[in-house]
Amino acid sequence: MDIYKIVRKTIRELQPYSSARSEYSDSGSILLDANENSFGSVIEGEYHRYPDPMQKKLKEQIAQLKNISADCIFLGNGSDEAIDLLIRVFCEPGRDKVMIFPPTYGMYQVCAGINNVTVIPVNLKKNFQISSEQVKKSIDSSTKIIFICSPNNPTGNLLAVEDIQTLLSDRQRIIVVDEAYIDFAETRSLLELLPDYNNLVILQTFSKSWGLAGIRLGMALADQDIIGLMNKIKYPYNINLLTQEKALQALQNYHHQKILVKKILKQREWLVSALSKFEIVEHIFPSRANFILVRFKDARLVFRHLWENGVVVRDRSHAIHCENCLRITVGKPGENMNLINLLHKLHR
Ligand SMILES: *Cc1c(COP(=O)(O)O)cnc(C)c1O
């Protein structure tokens, strides 16, 4: 499809800001162009220069790991930045719409709301899969982006690839597949579909399986035209130097990510098995992520009991199809044991 046909006119015609470091970055030169502090920093370390606005080194490493071209990678201050930029590239405020599939991640709705973009919610079916009939009824040419979260937060399941491909095949709008939890899913990423669909955007993040929520680094992986548009409107130095350095270190430690994922999957299994023995547990939804959605007989009671004893979980009772459900992040062995022991006390 011609991506530029659905880009906002303002963005298509925008002359982007050109930063000093994007025009010249040779560290061998005498750099007197960016009004940096030429003497250094007030703390130890080389922090007086602006960071690489396009994060070239980091993207080259990620490109190798993901086996894609560096031109197909956007890096943001968390995936949340990518969500916001995509809406601002494609959705004309007050006119265009985005579609979401509740119960799902809250940021799609919030970012749309901030940009005065209408959200069309099409509830997932009771099995937490997309209802193609409902989509057909609710979609129109002003629906510019569809946000799909797989594995889905808070339900933990993967969405059917066939349903996602049906939406992609329309080639009328952008399909964003948020794969924040893909490394826990023991399945293939939809990255392999990128060459076939230039309307596909995959979101991934360093916040979950890499254990780097604190450095704020998310990725959008897509056709280079879409990446170019996101780069055009991002803040010039959106990824700071410390984050770029830490992420490069993390990529050198790729094997450790695998170890962390293995530990979490083992604990997830243990938690499911322990939870399944409780009478107060009505249902444990199968999880492909690092959390478990659990339906209790009385979620409020459980939540309060845990809260009062210093264990905080997420109450999702008010989300559609999630009555009496708590979302529990998989913890370390001692933390999970603690949770189970507290539930035993409630049981008596
Ligand atoms: C945690 C999470 C993210 C990650 O957001 P960051 O801004 O990268 O930390 C993205 N999408 C979903 C669905 C999540 O649950």
Image (spheres, rainbow, N blue to C red):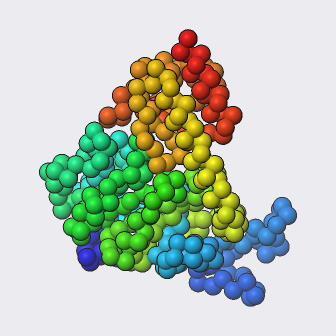
Q: In the rendered view, does 239 fall on the left or right side of 300?
A: right
- Residue 148 position within the rendered picture, expressed as x and y whole percent measured from the top left: 35, 55
Q: Residue furthest top?
A: 348
The reply to whether residue 105 is visible in this rendering is no
Q: Residue furthest bottom?
A: 29
- Residue 129 position within the rendered picture, expressed as x and y whole percent measured from the top left: 29, 48
323 over 103 or under it: above or below: above
Q: In the rendered view, does 92 fall on the left or right side of 271?
A: left
Number of marks in picture: 0
Which residue is nearer to you in this view: 315 or 78? 315
- Residue 89 position within the rendered picture, expressed as x and y whole percent measured from the top left: 36, 66
327 over 301 or under it: above or below: below
101 over 18 or under it: above or below: above
Name the residue: 48% across, 18% down.
301
Task: Say which quadrant the N terminus sits in.
Answer: bottom left
Q: In the rendered view, does 267 fall on the left or right side of 108?
A: right
Which residue is nearer to you in this view: 48 or 337? 337
Q: Which residue lies furthest to the left in this view?
A: 137
The reply to whether residue 308 is visible in this rendering is yes
Task: Say which quadrant the C terminus sits in.
Answer: top right
Name the residue: 50% across, 33% down.
314
203 over 54 or under it: above or below: above
Q: In the rendered view, does 180 fall on the left or right side of 321?
A: right
Name the residue: 48% across, 29% down.
276
Name the residue: 28% across, 39% down.
126
